Each structure stands twice: as structure tokens, then as C-alpha cells.
Image (cartoon, rainbow, N blue to C red):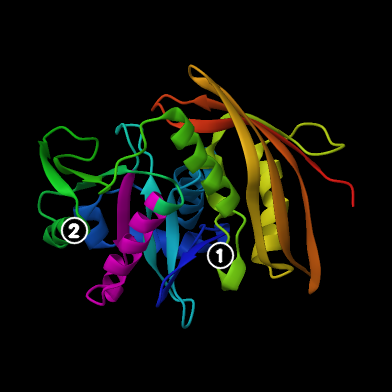
Amino acid sequence: MQILETDRLRLRWFRPDDAAFLLGLINEPAWITGIRDSGVRSEAAALEWMQGRLIEPYWRDGHGFWMVERRSDAEPLGLCGIFKRDTLPLPDLGYGLAARHAGQGYAREAACACLDYAQQVLGRTELLAITSPTNEASKRLLRDLGFVDEGLTEDGPDGPSLNWRWRAAEPAPAQPEAQIDALVQRFFAAFDNRGGAIAPLAALPALFMPDARITAPGQPAGSVREFVEPRAALLQDGRLREFTEWELEQQTLVDGTRARRELRYSKFGLLDGRPFGCSGRKQLELAQDGEGRWRIAALSWQDDPL
């Protein structure tokens, strides 16, 4: 699935056919000394490592480490993304490029784009990062991005590491209603591909609870993945273009750490070159997760009769 594009770069999900490139990347001397030695020495092991380390978090967290490609020729350059480690309380920004592509500003370009994606698409107002104490290039880049050095951890999972934290200039809204408004806006924005933009559907698992159930008209309840995959096929393969969906009116009831939002919506785009759209009603059940962030626990909708 496509994630984002910059002037020179394209970021996408890793695929099984990236195993050979990944094997070379994580066995480069600079990677082993500056990041970690994963102990992966064969393409089969790289594929297994990729599945557990890279691909599974896409559906679990709605983000992770993404392949960085050069747009001009699809040359794989490395990885960059927003990753949730078991050892850290918040997601962190991470990156690593092949040594032959160093010194061309690719890491900075990818990291800047991922930081913006974390804030605008994922709704993150705080991120972490970790670096080797001797990785001067990464320390300079993190400082330039606005990360603050929070000190050294001597016994990190990969040895001594420097800890960094980034905070948005504007904190998250304090009132539950405003937080829910922002969540719903990000939900609708995930389908928007107007002007050739990449619809950020890959972020939707981050907006839903892990066990969320989604009920389409006339169908049994399904998972977030079952909801996202067919829509990604439409919105990212060119069949459904210039699409947008927006909220018309809403009513929200908050009860502690649970809430319900009932709303009317409208949507419009071009499906196979022909106008496509309608209005309807959605119902969202919402809950706060372990971080205190509002997420969608259940979703159902009904389009108005044509």
C-alpha cells in the first residue's frame, strides 16, 4: 500500500519481494554498528524478519517502517517510518538508508515527511526516537527536526542509546468532544485522493481499536482489514479518483471513556470516470485506549436511497 510521496521519494509498505534488498540493508556494516545486528543472514530469514517486524505492525498499529524508494526510477533506498516498540511507551521515528545513498539528503527528506504524516494523519502530538550515542548524523537530523535529547540509557535492548522526544507546537485538545472531532476528521481524510493525492487508508488501523467491528449495509460485521483492503484497491489503483467524503452534521454523547457519534455524511468522486456519490448516516462507537486517545470501537453506516 502506498503511504506518501515527497519531491524525490515514495514511501510504501514492504512486500515479500523486497526480502533480498532488506537482507543487504540490515547487514551493512553501518547498519550493524549504528542500529543493530539482527542476526539475519539469509533471504528466507529476511522474509520471516520482515513479516514479523515490518508487515504485521501495518495492520496492528496503522504505521511502521516503510520502504523508501526513489520516485524517478523506483530504486530502493532504505526504510523510514513511525514504529511502536514494546520497550517504549510511545511510537518513535526511525530510519536507515543503504550506505551508497548516504549524503544525498534522502534520510532528512523521508524523516520530515514521516514526522508530518505522524502529526497530520495519525494525530500524534508527541513522538520518541532512539539513536546510538556515536551516530552523529542521526543526532544532527533529530535536532533539526525539533527532537530534544533526553539522556542516555545504558542498558537498552540494543545496548547504550540516546533517547529523544518531539512535541508538537500545539498540544492535543483537552476536551473529549474536540478530540473526537479531530479523530472523525482524520477518519474522513483517510479516503481523500483529490488532486492525485495518496489516500492514507493505511493509517486507519491506528484510528480503530484492535478488535473494532465494522458493519456494512446488508453484510455481517467485519474487521478493519476487511474494511480497508477493498477501499484501498479502489482509491489507490486509479478506479476511484477525486474522491472525498465529509461530515454534514453530528450529535455526540460522551460518557466517561466511552462515546457515541451519530452523523450525516456526503461523498463524491469519479468511479471509472463517471460521477459517483451519495449521502447517508454513520454511527461510531468510540473508546479511549491505554494512552487515553480516542479510537473507533465500532462503525456502521447506511447510504440514503438513490
Q: Give the extent of the magenta segment.
A: 92-119
Q: Do the numbered discs 1 and 2 sit on residues whose CB atoms are within 8 Å?
A: no
Q: CA distance from mark 1 to mark 2?
A: 28 Å
Query: What is the quadrant of residue 172 in the picture?
Result: top left
Is residue 237 in sight in this rendering?
Answer: yes
Residue drawn at x 36%, y 57% is: 116
Residue farthest right in this picture: 306
Checking the image for residue 198, the label placed there is 1
- In this rendering, is residue 202 above or below 141? above
Residue 282 left/right relative to 136: right
- In this rendering, is residue 259 above or below 231? above
Q: Position of residue 249 (x, y in %)?
A: 64, 42
Q: Position of residue 234 (x, y in %)?
A: 72, 61
Q: Position of residue 111 (x, y in %)?
A: 31, 61
In the image, which is nearer the foreground, mark 1 or mark 2? Answer: 1
Checking the image for residue 301, the label placed there is none
